[in-house]
Amino acid sequence: MTLDKSILEIVEREIRDIKPFKPERLILCSTPTTCTIAAEAFKGINNIPFLVTSTNTDIDSNLYREFEYSEVQRIEHEEALLWTNINHSFLEPINDMLDSWVMKSTRVSYILASLENSFEEAILHQALSFLKGTRPDLMKILIVLLPSRADSVSLLFNAYIWLLKVLGDKLADIILLFDREQVESFEAISIDGETLNGFRALSYALRLIVERDQDLYDYFQSISRLEANVHIPLISLGHNLTIYDNIQNILTASTLNPLVNFNALRAKTMYMIPEIPINLKGKLTVEELRKELSKWIEEVELSPLFWDVSDPIVNTVETTRISIVGALGGIDLKNPLSHLAEGYTKFEGVALDREMIDKYDLKSIQKLEKEVIGYDR
């Protein structure tokens, strides 16, 4: 068994060495959850899935074998309750690995974070910091699964500080926040009629984003001066246009089952990526979709400073179902991050008593809260 696996790995490596190497995308994830999501979302797309994980994390090898190119790097690390207290000397190899993987032709990176442990947070912060410093032209899309309200206060404390630092230092160009509990209970259908529940639905939505990430880059350039890089999703998968009658009703329906707690009326920007069946190609043009979105924006009194729609992704199936993946930017973060802030508050005294943080750290965190969220303690 061991021999067969070794031979397979040798053959895969030889094939990879002789194949044309044109990495357009870098995918970085480090937990079984995010790797499972990535395996479905990025399957069959020319990219480099780059998995960095701790030695004691069990990730199914079949996940990364689905990719055209793949790499798994396992790192020994010291346990630490707070990711800010981790000895960063063990993270130095990450810089070298990223430097060797990111080519001139690499135009976008996807970083998937589930914020499950301090190791994950430490390596993702290191990777984001390195990419910002070395490749400012590389669009960095950060997908964040916010922890559950049932998670420990120490985990929520960690996640809250991590997000504050990432947002405060502007380490990612576009950040999409998803509520893990909402994602896990989400039920949908693809326009092909396939049942999509939980993380499979999230993978499907991310796949549509990947199909139009060049348009997303143009959108980012358009909103770069609006300080609106943090986004929340507005996702409609497989809604039947015949039943809902028009796009406006479908968009309204998607707000009834959101993937994160939000107040859509405070969004500064909006971008929509539609997927339509081939039989609706002539009817649902990008111009027609813009008209429909404009009517809905006026109806709900959203009044964004910038909004747009990408060219529709045309699926070869014939149906009346359509999917829309939207991103609302420049939103008020108090609502979606409220449970993280509550967990932080509950653990703050413990962290101070145990000298995990000091008064200087506390002032720095409070400053970030005010700058990033507008929360003044």
Image (cartoon, rainbow, N blue to C red):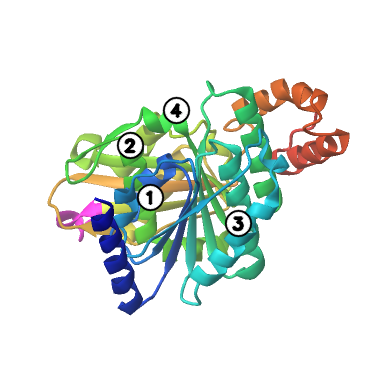
Query: The disc labelled 1 sits on which kind of residue?
Result: Ala
Spatial separation of the CA atoms under disc 3 and disc 4? 25 Å
Give the mark nearest the N terminus, 3 or 1. Answer: 1
Instruction: Give the CA distance from mark 2 to mark 3.
Output: 38 Å
Residue 245 seen in this snapshot:
no
Task: Please tell me how crowded label 2 is: few (under 14), some (14-19), or many (20+) other residues with Cα within 10 Å.
Answer: some
Residue flagged by tag 2: what amino acid is it? Asn
**Residue at the disc numbered 1:** 38
Q: Quadrant of residue 197?
A: top left
Callout 3: helix, strand or loop? Answer: helix
Nearer the observer, disc 2 or disc 1? 1
- Secondary-structure class at tag 1: helix
Closer to the camera in the image, 243 or 298: 243
Mark 2 / mark 1, whichever is N-terminal: 1
* Count of residue discs: 4
In three-dimensional space, the C-alpha distance between marks 2 and 4, rounded to whole angstroms, equals 25 Å
* Residue identified by numbered label 2: 249
- Which mark is first along the chain, 4 or 3? 3
Q: Is residue 334 above or below residue 123?
A: above
Q: Which residue is mark 3?
A: 128
Amino acid type of the residue tagged 3 in the rendering: Leu
Residue of label 4:
181
Q: Are marks 2 and 1 in contact (CB under 8 Å)?
A: no
Mark nearest the camera among 2 and 3 is 3
Magenta-highlighted residues:
276-283
Q: Position of residue 176 (x, y in %)?
A: 51, 46
